[in-house]
Image: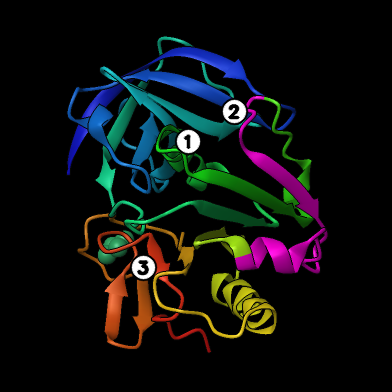
Amino acid sequence: MRETQAIIERVRSVNETHQQLDLAVEPALAQMRPGQYVLARVGEGWTPYLREPWWYVLSGKGSLTVERPVTIDYEPGQVVSLLGAVGQPFRFRRTLRNVLLLVHETEPSPLLSMIPPLLASRVSVTMVLLGSAAGYTTAHLPPEVEVISGDSDMNWANRVTTVGWADQVFVVVPQSDELGHFSRIWDLFGQLRAEIPQGYLFGVFRPLLPCGTGACSACMVRTKSGNVLACTQGPTFDLTQVRLG
Ligand code: FES
């Protein structure tokens, strides 16, 4: 992982809440894999703020498309300092037919990069948007993605079937009280399934990342086999292995 500079080439809004930025990046960075991301700082020179995680949704030859909230102004031509690729890719099962993406009270951006390769491998993708996540409109997503909305109490239509049919589930929750939210998801799946096997239910952990390089230990996650770092070993962990309580 190293620091490089990128240029914002295009900015377009994709729905009422989010915009996508096309970035010209170094070729090596465009080879990021789904699950990885970059830590970004806009503009040149020192700032007191932490770099922000930018989640890519598409990669191309020398380009990355990232998704950002519309509340922040970006202009074509702006220079962005990127640190990356950060983290480890999503770990998919070898035999995979159905993937469930669960978005609870947050934005789905961290999960979107897996959609094009999964669809290209003929894996079906269902996205469940719960609570405030249902405000994220999805007309810009590939039409093959089945989108279901639900409430903040995690009720949605055909819940038992959706959960039973998924080979793997990837969950994203608000950054505040991630463990509390993941615990609720864990309890729900415990009610809906006879068992939660290893390699089935994954949480994407997004703590603040002061360094992003494994140097400060601020992003520690407690697992059954010891402490791990969300920045270098995450962001995605098997919830059967995480100490949620
Ligand atoms: S952010 Fe510093 S070790 Fe992860």
Q: Which residue matches tag 3? A: 219
Segment tinted magenta in the rendering: 140-164
Q: Residues within 10 Å of mark 1 (few under 14, many from 20)?
A: some
The residue closer to the viewer here, 42 or 114, is: 114
Q: Is the residue indicated by label 3 positioned so its CB lies within 8 Å of ligand 1? A: yes
Circle 2 — which element? loop
Magenta stretch contains residue 158: yes
**Of the numbered discs in the image, which one, if any, rests on residue 142?**
2
Going by the image, does 198 lie left or right of 201? left
**Relative height, residue 16 to residue 95 (above, below):** above
Q: Which of pointers 2 and 1 indicates the residue nearer the eye?
A: 1
Instruction: Please tell me which residue is depicted at 44% across the width and 86% down the height of the picture.
Output: 243
Res. 105 image quadrant? bottom right
Q: Which of pointers 2 and 3 indicates the residue nearer the eye?
A: 2
Q: CA distance from mark 2 to mark 1?
A: 9 Å
Q: Which residue matches tag 1? A: 119
Indicate the position of residue 169 as horizontal and vertical percent values: 53, 61
